Structure formats: C-alpha cells, structure tokens
Image (cartoon, grey):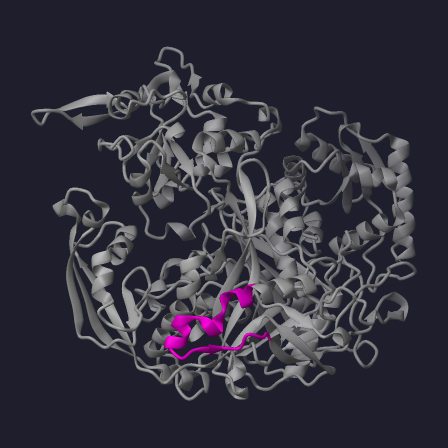
Amino acid sequence: MSASGRSRSGSASGQQPEGSGRSRSGSASGQQPEGSGRSRSGSASGQQPEQSKSVVGGFDRSKYPLRDKEGVSKRLDLPPEAYYHDDDIKHPFAKRPGFCTLGKPAKVAVNQFRVNKIGNVDVYQYDLAISPIPVKAILIEKIWDTPKWQAKLNEHKSSWIYDRRKLVWSINKVKEIRSIINIDEHKGRESNDRNTFHVVLRNTGTIRLEALRAYLNGKMEFDNSVLECMNFLDHVIRETPSKTMKSIRRLFFNRDSKRMDLNNSMEVMQGMYASMRMNQSIQEGGYGLGINLNIANCAFYMSQDFEQLCCEFLRAYKREWEQMDYRDMAKMLRPVTIKVQGKKDRYEPSEAFMILTKLYRIKFEVKHRNQDAKKADKTYTVKKFSFSQSYGPDGGNAKNVTFKRKVVGGFEEDVSVYDYFFEKYKIELRMWKLPIIETSRGGYFPMEIAEVPKYNRYPFKLTPNETSKMIKFAVQRPPVRLDDIMTKARALKWKEDPILNEFGIGIDPNMAKVNARIIPNPEIQFGGGQKHNPGTTGRWDLRGKKFFKPCPALKSWAFVALEKCIDKPGLENFARVFSQAWKNHGGAIEKPPIFFEYPGGQQHHYICENAYQECGKRNKATPQIIFYVLVDRTAWIYDRMKKNADCRWACLSQMMLIDHVRKAQPQYASNVAMKVNAKLGGITSRIPGSKPNEPAFFKVPTMMIGCDVSHASPGSKAASMAAMTCSLDKDGAFFVGTCETNGHRVECLLPQNVRSMLRDPIKMFVKNNKVAPKHVFYLGDGVSEGQFCHIKEYEVKAIRAAFKEVCNEVPKITVIIATKRHHIRFFPEKASADKNGNPLPGTLIDREVTHPFHYDFYLCSHVAIQGTARPVHYHVIDDEVKMKPDDLHKMLYQQCYQYIRATTPVSLHPAVYYAHLCGARARQHENVATSDQVPLAAKNWVQGREPGWGAKVQVPASLASSKIDPTESDPLLPMGGEESREDSRNMFTSGMWYI
C-alpha cells in the first residue's frame, strides 16, 4: 500500500497481478525550443442523494496532515496514526485483543526479512537549501552530484544519505557546509550566472531511533520523531541498490531483468519490490521491522526511435492499421476537416491523433546533438503534440509550427522548426509531415530526432490480449517465486552493504518463518438439509444438490437471440437443458419460456422493449427474467442491452454467449441457474449453525455491509462509482446492492452517498427479519492507512445516521478493511500446502509480519488455480461488536464458502466481492447519451487529461469555478424509467441484480 493513497478498486494499469487465481462458476509558448532551442442504482425509492455543503465531500483534508509532510518519502508504509489529526485520542484504532487459536498450527515462510539490529549511533539530519531555488527537481540532483560539492562532502569521513530532494542524513556531525556551485563548470561549458547556486547544508537535529523502538513496543504514541526514523531507514536500505539498479518508487530493475514483448511498442519486465514495514518481531528478538521483498512485473514502452514507437503504438490499436507505414501514419495524424456551410472550414483532431495523446508525459531523449552533450543533457517530457486551427488541414507539422528567435540587433523573427533544424544542425527532416512534440519546458521537437529510453512506464489499462500475455509472463508457482525472491535477496548482499554496516543495520538473509493457524473448513448446507464437507480441496460439485432457498417459480420468462445468431431449435434445446438443471437444483417452472429471434440491424432499445412487452403480454404477468444470446463479447452491445433492461424496464436479464448456448452443456446451465436464482431472490447454499435453523456466526440480528469505490479507466472523465452491498438474511448469505456516482476519482465514500444508499437495504432487513440489526460489520475494500481516519470519522458516522433515521436506533459497528493490494506471500511447509505449494484454504497469520499491536491479520481462504496465492490483509480499525478473535477469523473465512455463484470459496469476503461486482455493473447506469453505433473508443483516452491539441480539459460547468469539483458528478439513472412497473422495480432491487 502506498502511504499517501490507495485505490479501492481502480483500473488495471501496466502493473498486473501475479496470476494467482481461484475457481469460479460462471499551444505555442513563444519560447525558443530546447531541441531547436435522482435515484441511485439499485434503489427504487426515487430519492435523490443528499448534498453535504459543510465539508468538501464530507472530508476536510486539512484535518489530516501527515506530520512534517515535506520531505517524507511516498514509499513509506506508515501506520494509520501517521494520518490521524486528534492528538488527544490515544490509540485511535482497535488494538489486537488476542491471537488465533483455531484449527491446527503450521509453519509458513513469509517473504519478509527481519531487521535484527540497528546500531547505537547518533544519526544527524540535515536540510539542503539552494538559492536561487531550482525550478526543476532534476536540477537539485545535478547540483548535488557536481564534483565540487561531492569533494566538499568527502572532507568528512562518513557517508551522506540524500533523499534527492531536501533531506540528508549522516553520522558526520557538522554545523553546516557551504559552497557556490556552477553546474556549467564540470560540463566544460562557458559559465552562466543563471546556473550558479549558493548551497547550504545545515544540521537540523538528531534522529531519535529510540522513539521508533518505543512506539513499536507500544510505550509511546506515533509522533514526528517516529516518522523521521522511518523516513531515514527507508532511504538507508535503498541507498546502495539505487546506485546499481533503476529505482521506480518501491520497484527495482536492472539490465538483466527478465522481459517479454507485449507488442512492438510495449514490453513487460520483471523487477523487485522492496519496502520496510513495521512488524511484531520486536516481541521475539527482532527490532520490530522487516523488509518485504517480492517479484514485481511492470509494463514499459519499448526503447526505440520516437516515430517508430508512434507507428507501432497505432498499429497495435486497431487491426486495420496493422500494415500502416510512416506515410500512412502522417496522413492519419492530419486533422479532420469539418465543412460548415457559410463559414470557414474547421479542423478537429483525427482518431489516430487522439489515440497518440496517450503518449502524454512519456520521457524522451534527443539524438541530433554530439554524444558528449547528449550524455550530459537531460531527458524531456511530452506535454502534447502540436495542434491549432491556424495550422490548417496539414496540422502542426515541422513546416507549419513556428517560433520566434532572436537575431542580430536584438530583433525577433519567426522561423519554422523545419528551417531551424536545417540552419542550426544541417538536418533536413525526412518525416516533417508528422506532428511536432511540445515539451513541458516549452520546447519543440520533430519526432525523428527523439528516442524513447528504457523504463518509461505504461500507465494505462492493458488490452485483453496484452493482459493475457502479461499474466502468462507473471504467473509463478510458489517454489519458483520463492527461489526468485531469495535470488534477489542474495543479490542485495545486505551483510556486505557498506551503508547498512556504517549505520549498524543487520538484516536476516532468510525469510521469516511464522507460526500460522489453519482454520477448519465449514460444512456447506444445501436444500433439503443436505450437507457437504469439501475438506481442504476448496471445491465441490453442485450435481445432485438443491438450492438452499429456491426463488419463486418461473412463470414469465423468455429467451432472445440477437442477430438471429442461433435458430429456434437450438435455442429451445438450450432452454430444455437449462430447465432440467433448474429443476434438479430445486427450482420450479410454472410456464415454459417464450422464444424471440431478432435480425441484425435491429436497434437494441427496440429489442428490449419488444421482448419485455411481448413476454408480459403472452404470460399475462410481469416478466421475471429475460435471457439474451449475444454473438460475441463486444462490450458496447452488452452495455446497451443491460442499460435498456435495467434503466427503462427494471427487468432482470441474463446475457449468454452463443458458443455456450450452442454447446448447451449441463455444467454451464447449472452455473447460469445459480446466477438466475440469486437475481430472483434465492440462495445457493449457507454455512449451517450447530443447531437446525440457527445461524452459524451471529447471536443477534446482524447485517454485513460491503463497500467498494471504483474508478473509470485512466484518461476517462467518467465518475467514480461507490457501491454498497448489504446482507438481508440471518446467515449473511444474501446481499442486495446499491450504487451511486462518487465524484471524480474521490477515493472515499461521500457521506451523503452512504446515508442515501443505506436507507432501502435497512428497510428491507427490518421487513425480512421483523427486527432492526443490533450488530453491523462494515467491510471496506482496498483502503490505505491514509484513509482510515476518513472512514472512522465520516463513513461510519453516516452509517449511524442512516440507522438512526430508519430504525431510530444505532447498532454496534465493527469496521474491517480488506485489501489484496500488498506484497505478502505465504510459502508453507509441504505438510501444510496443496499440490502446487500454495497454503491450504483457511491459513491465517496474525504474528511476526503483522503490526506490533494493531488488530490485523492475513488470511488465505481460497485455492489458487495458477500462480502464487495472494492472501487478503484484514485490518480491524474500529471494534464495537467485540467478537472474539477466533469467532471473527472463523466468520470471515467460512463466509467465503457462501459466495452465491461459485462452487469454491473465494479469496475475498463476499460482501466486498459483491460490492465490486455491483460497482462494475452500475457503469451501464451512467446518465450519458447512447446510440446504436460503435462509440469512438479513442475519445475515452483523452477526456479528463490535457488533450494533445491544446484544448482545455473538459469538465462539467458546475465544476469550472468550484473548489469542490472532485466531489460533484451526475447521479446514475434510476432502476426503471417512467414506462416500468412498480412490481418490476421492486423485484429488481430486492434481488442480486448485479450477479
């Protein structure tokens, strides 16, 4: 987790998961160029979300300052107290009440290396002051690295650790060091007063390592002295590796890193993740710190000439562009001419140009200067590609783009980029028709003199094909990953590291061996009292088993074949197979389904309307569910069908691919039956209590609430989505879902969303159970320590307000954060592992690698199909229910067997899993115009960031002059429009529509 932020459920970027899995059913600057010089989704109430005006989104960020934030590394893994504002509250987060004693013990190696000692030396902290203040951070580094300044530092015997910004640490004790540095001197260039700086290194105090020790022992609160210690230690452990490897935040890469091409413009490289974390080792002879090492895989742009990268980038984007050459590319990048009657022609960026704007912020070097100058010079950053109406139909090419340069006499004249390079460098540009690169420093560069260096991270979501390649590259079974981690640990040579030795830091070269517990798996109860014990296999078969709670009988339902992708006999055959599977699982059918075939070209809104109306008319009953057979996985077709069914008619639907329908396999029909049963209010199975009809986990009425915030793809201006799922039954097996927009990339739930989204589920719970919940377990997904304060102060407060409003009473609430975005992995001994070397389901660790006193633990609840299993990190941040640790561990693990559409336990608690599904499904409910034409996909990449053609960022008008713009967004469409029926809306929202 990043110390400064988190992504609850963000879009996938270049860095991909390891492949661990589970089984589941179913404009010009004028400067001389440098190179050339209503109702939320899931609710039928019709109420609109409340608007909070007192605080921006309910979250006053000024109340949560990270102590001494300036100079603190973003790589730090800090405890949540580092972000808490109220110093009067001692231990604001739940403390561990005890350890797990369930099941049997096991020994598990964990990829964390214990820090055994830190020397009893005085460490002095210094502040680096430079005047005048350098405009760019890279200039500060250049000043620090000059021979003159280094010679000044070397007058003192010990090393100097520099954070590349402002802070310096050393055993050397001096009051201050002063010097005047001219960065032109060591480059052999004529001295320029603008490059002369006064540098002062001034002692600001001593690092109190005993303060860190006291905090880890629980003898003092977190304060600035602890923060200083962690910041210092983080830089110390990275100092030596950073000199020999490429460091990107917490990742390290070297020249020998394993790599693979994703396409001709991108590659994936294997690197090493390294982070220092607080842990419990202080209780067993360690220092209370550990180094977490893991394998990390990251996507990069390939190192190549810039114009080649652009060409390959576009070729990979669309199949019809695969054979394009540079001439084709130049034509495709020209503006599109818009004819306007009676007015001057207007020009807009082409689709290819818009796609190319994804290269915004990519780093590049130049190759038209001599080699020595190139080595000494800097890297540039793409700001945009030249575009202006004034450039006309040929666009911002090298002959059209001009700038002013000074000539003899102090006058200025316009010169084109093409002429400048010919006159200055005797370079006649061959690809002058390509757009000019504009940099963040106001420079203009032709593409053909630029080249892309290594380690340019690809920041966007990968395509399905690229993702597939990434997973194949990244997936490693536990023994292979273990060997790779140990190889990288040995390569760090901690015992020989001169910096670590100087500060007396000792790190165990072996992974931590941790005492774990394996919690017993539960029995699973199906309909008719039938039970099944899956043992440690982590899977079971649904054949011969009935649903624990079947939904009402099917009496108004239909099958629809889009584009006549299958004939009626084929559709009827699948219906027979499905009906048989449905009956085998205890489902009832009162009337047979109705069949519809629609030819290609029919508009999707008509298909939905006609099928819904005809189904209801022929059956003389409101349609319960309609099955649609799709030709392929085209997302926009799926989205339109779902949007029409959900938001116009509030009609439940089940989408199926033609290939599966043709095969009509009973197992597939059974998987579909599980989803249909859940959508219509049924339950597949439950974990039984010790007595018949008694819940397994709760002694009083209890509601489980799952929460997830997801964001649109990078570059899209679509709103973030907040989703909440709430259990309605006594077992915590059946969850209804609500969803609403949550501003733009706002990480935490807006309190007004919490209150409005919870009203209807609370009413449903009371109606079903004849009593209000007495206990609530609130599970958040992927929240970093930096947001724990917000959850305690705003989200939980809003939950209490919602219960007070509906029930006139407030339940006890326990708040648990569940995240998989971490780098802890389990490597159990053979006796406690499955056949692939992964931990058995139920393996829990709450010692050694967890926080010294916070209530957290790691739990592996699933069976990984491939790769190395990733456990979930559960962190209890507030505990009013005070369930015993063993009972809490058992509940969180065994409820993973109640996931309603699978025949295997899932890796993440179902409440959180369902919230993620709910947020993803509600994307189809966004209040945006749709049509029956394929949208221009490229537009989504440039909305929300500075477009490459110089236009302003498009934001809603309400945000343009507002300081609270991130929290505003248009609400989702309601479930069911004016044409829908009330009983249909009620049926929709009371089931698991998002499954």
77 or 450, nearer to the observer = 450
Left or right, residue 516 beside residue 445: right
Up/down of 764 relative to 278, above or below: above
**Residue shown at 59%/64% (left/top)?**
487
Q: Which residues are magenta?
A: 488-511
Residue 924 locus on image (x, y percent): 60, 43
**Residue 494: in magenta span:** yes
Q: Nearer the viewer, residue 806 or 475?
A: 475
Residue depicted at x 82% and y 41%:
660
**125 vs 331: above or below:** below
Question: Compared to 1, does 318 lie above or below?
Answer: above
Instruction: Tell me: 226 left or right of 141.
Output: right
Q: Is residue 183 magenta?
A: no
Q: Residue at point 56% right, 29% down?
A: 315
Q: Please say whether residue 701 is visible from this viewpoint.
A: no
Question: Viewer-proximal residue, 788 or 469?
Answer: 469
Q: Quadrant of residue 231?
A: bottom left
Q: Position of residue 694 (x, y in %)?
A: 78, 78
The image quarter in which residue 90 lies? bottom left
Q: Looking at the rendering, which quadrant does residue 51 occupy? A: bottom left
| Depicted 741 relative to depicted 451: above or below | below
Number of marks: 0
Residue 214 lies, in percent from the top left, at: 41, 86
In-front residue for pair 198/694: 198
Can residue 54 be seen in the rendering of this structure? yes
